[in-house]
Image (spheres, rainbow, N blue to C red):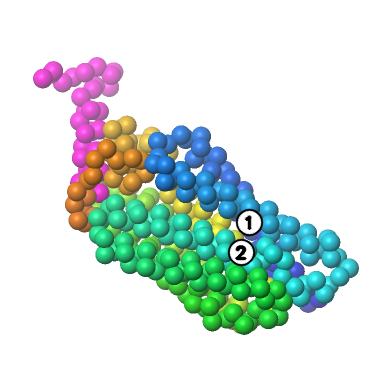
Amino acid sequence: MGLYDQTLGPLLVGIFFNTYLYGIVTYQFASYHRANFNDRLLVKSVVAFLFVLDTVHSIAVIYMAWVYMVTNYTNPTALQFGVWPYPFTPIGTAAAALVTHLFLGDRIYRLTHNKVLSGIIIAMAIPTFALGMVDGIEAWIIHVNADMTRIKAPVIAWLSMQVTVDTFLTVTLSIILARAQTGMPTTDTVLRRLIRGAIQTGLFASIFSLGDLITFLLLPDANFYGMFAIPIGRIYSNTLLDTLLVREKLKMEMSSSAFERTSRVMGWIPATRVTPGPTATNLHIAVHRSLHDSTDIVSSYDGEGKNITNPV
């Protein structure tokens, strides 16, 4: 095994993978901008914030690699000290996680109108963000990599909470959307895609958070935890943008009125009125009616595009 296989090696792998994910996020952001969705200002702000955060962090970790591997090529003692992008990683990840958690929490509220459920999500998301900020700030102050074990307790608390929130959101959204299935193929296709997005959001972020936690505890003197920690923020952005871009396919499969009504129920675009209802059945009713309307429109024309219904 080489001299730097457990220090620079894992760090470089994490930066490579992060750069790859950033390329995907950039493509998704361009696709979102090109699609010109009539989204709420809040949704557009979330997308813009995550893209700026991803850009800053991705540039910063490449700079960190340059400092370690080029500037200090003949100075291996530099590996004993953390360059500022390293402690910035938990801060950026905590910010991306908070935005994503609150965004998905808002979606759950719009589907269920359950204030207690939304309150639980907020009560978990904000302390998780605070713990991530504390970890980043303390790592910034410690500066010496060998002393990072001093923040073991807050790191365990932060990553454990992050996995808990991701799992809770994934399970909750999946249950809500699964209960809304109608038995109609087109409607259920929409719901299955939304469930897939919910599962992706929690699954991949949880895997990397657990990898970060396990390697930090078992291999504190190596940089394997950095290999998992650096890309987590991009994973949140990637999965969130994927749930927004799925509408491109839905838009082609649904009529404009059906698509617009579904988008209002999901909270993507500004609502002209509040959709009442305490449970996820709201999504069932709204999507079912939308598809029923579109079916009526399509069925009123024959194969040659002629109107075959009698005017009222």
Q: Residue at x 76, y 75 (%)?
A: 80
Q: How many other residues sit within 10 Å of disc 1, few (<14), some (14-19) or many (≥20)?
A: many
Give the labeled residue for mark 1: 57
Residue 257 image-quadrant placement = top left
Which structural element holds mark 1? helix
| Amino acid at dot 2 | Thr
C-alpha gap between disc 1 and disc 2? 7 Å
Q: How many other residues sit within 10 Å of disc 2, few (<14), some (14-19) or many (≥20)?
A: many
Q: Residue at x 29, y 64 (%)?
A: 117
Q: Position of residue 244 (x, y in %)?
A: 43, 46
Magenta extent: 283-312
Give the labeled residue for mark 2: 89
Q: Position of residue 276 (x, y in %)?
A: 19, 48
Q: Which residue is at the far right?
A: 74
Let me know if residue 160 is in the magenta part: no
Q: Position of residue 292 (x, y in %)?
A: 21, 37
Residue 190 vs residue 68, the one in the foreground? 68
Is residue 191 rendered to the left or right of residue 45? left
